[in-house]
Image (tube, grey):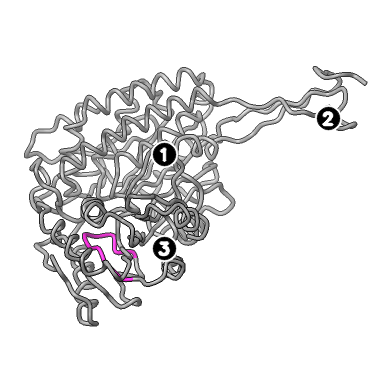
Amino acid sequence: MLDSILGTAPDAVIHAPALLGGKWIADGPSAERVGPFTRTAVSRARVAEPQDARVAAEYAKSGARTVARLAPATRAEVLDRAAALAAEHRDTFARLIALELGKPVKDGRGELDRVADTFAVCAAEARQIGGDLLPVAGWARGVGNTALTYRAPAGVALAITPFNAPANLLAHKLGASYAAGNSTIVKAPPQAPAVSAAIVALLLEAGAPVEAVQLLHGGGAVGAALCEAPEVAVISFTGSAETGAAVARAAGAKRLVLELGGNAATIVCDDADLAAAAQVCARTGYSNSGQSCISVQRVYVDRRHFAAFVDLLSAEVAKLRVGDPLDPSTDVGAMVDDRAAERVLTWATEAADSGARITVGGTRDGATLAPTVVADPPPDAAVVTQEVFGALVSVLPFDDFDAVLETCNASRYGLQAGLFTRDIGRILTAWRELEVGGLVVNGSSNFRLDHVPFGGVKDSGFGRESPRHMVEDYTVVKTLLLRGLSIWGEN
């Protein structure tokens, strides 16, 4: 199936089948994905029917035991092969991502490099799964007994993935769940059905048993039905805060890992290298057209250097090449659809009408928004308070470091922040005081290592996405008590 998806002729519509009950299914209701740059149908997904969620849940429950019985070393070997396959098919995947999402191929290649890393780290974590010998004989009632624990698979996991990084975010969820020994149901984003199907097919090509994974396409209804399924033990969801709340309501008493939205702030202090900070913010504010939960959105600059930084950033942004995502030289491609680009442009115009300056950009062509810089918007502007999730960066001045930390914390979100300074005191203060899950020093908010804990606070969700932490979420601790048998002293 992997070759069938990735080997589709350049101008043909790519078929994205479902994987249900151990079989790839192409027949049935379907939906086309129109590429935001090509403006033509690029893929066609087999959409889930009402009974499919029930079939998937029951099959996953029965298949979970097959996966759980695989030794961690066996699962690790499959994940290592998956990493190698991701590297082998890097360019083909990047082209598919560009077609379905308008993401430049050089960004898609970078995403596949991360997929390979993610699967490799998941393999390493599978080899580390173990347990503990508990010190029960340290208390009088425990004398003469032995107790041990191990981390057992949770059983059935549900992975609901977003469109903005469909390959790597699915690799995180599916790779960690398989490393833990679970059977996983994947609910793919409607905007990237073929990419999702290819990642699932890649894991099977690497040697995972068919009981390990199923794939359904569709909208919110199929996602809700899967969340409600009693067979599902743990849900990992990445998406908006509003949808995350709906997932939590539908899930009920299930284990949840929610990685939700953000409107990330980056602080540029008076001792920062302004030119270097401007280059980093330009590069990381518009990758994937700003469609990342940690993309640079709000940049707060010491007022004494505000005007100079705006000029530097605007000049760097103006250098970005906008165009065909299939062109290797393109820096910024299309956003996910016309509506998303129009929303961001509307917010920029509203800020300008309220006194802000648009120093570069501020136009769109269909789903392609010219990289836009908004200088000194009002604090209550949508570009400041809401999640932009688009090719726009706002720049605002600040006068006091402690005060700007409070300004950053006023957001309902708290995913990740950036800080440019050489002052260790400011670094430690920001690390302590900022209400975020992660702080990047001498870098923007938009930086992530896939083997490092990642996640937020407040409306940015809870739980941490890195293979080690996700394996913990995907497993349960099982205790063994041996009465009358002791490796400790008897008296």
**Picture quarter containing residue 16?**
top left
Residue 395 forms part of the magenta stretch: yes
Q: Which residue is mark 3?
A: 242
**Picture quarter containing residue 107?**
top left
Q: CA separation, marks 1 and 3?
A: 20 Å
Task: Indicate which label's residue lies in the foreground, 3 or 2.
Answer: 2
Tell me the residue at 15%/29% (across/down): 7
Amino acid identity at mark 3: Glu
Amino acid identity at mark 2: Gly
Q: Earlier in the sequence, mark 1 or mark 3?
A: 1
Q: Is residue 190 left or right of residue 464?
A: left
Q: Which mark is residue 173?
A: 1
Residue 306 forms part of the magenta stretch: no
Q: Earlier in the sequence, mark 3 or mark 2?
A: 2
Does residue 468 sit above or below 260 in this rendering? above
Q: Which residue is mark 2?
A: 138
Which residues lie in the magenta part? 387-397
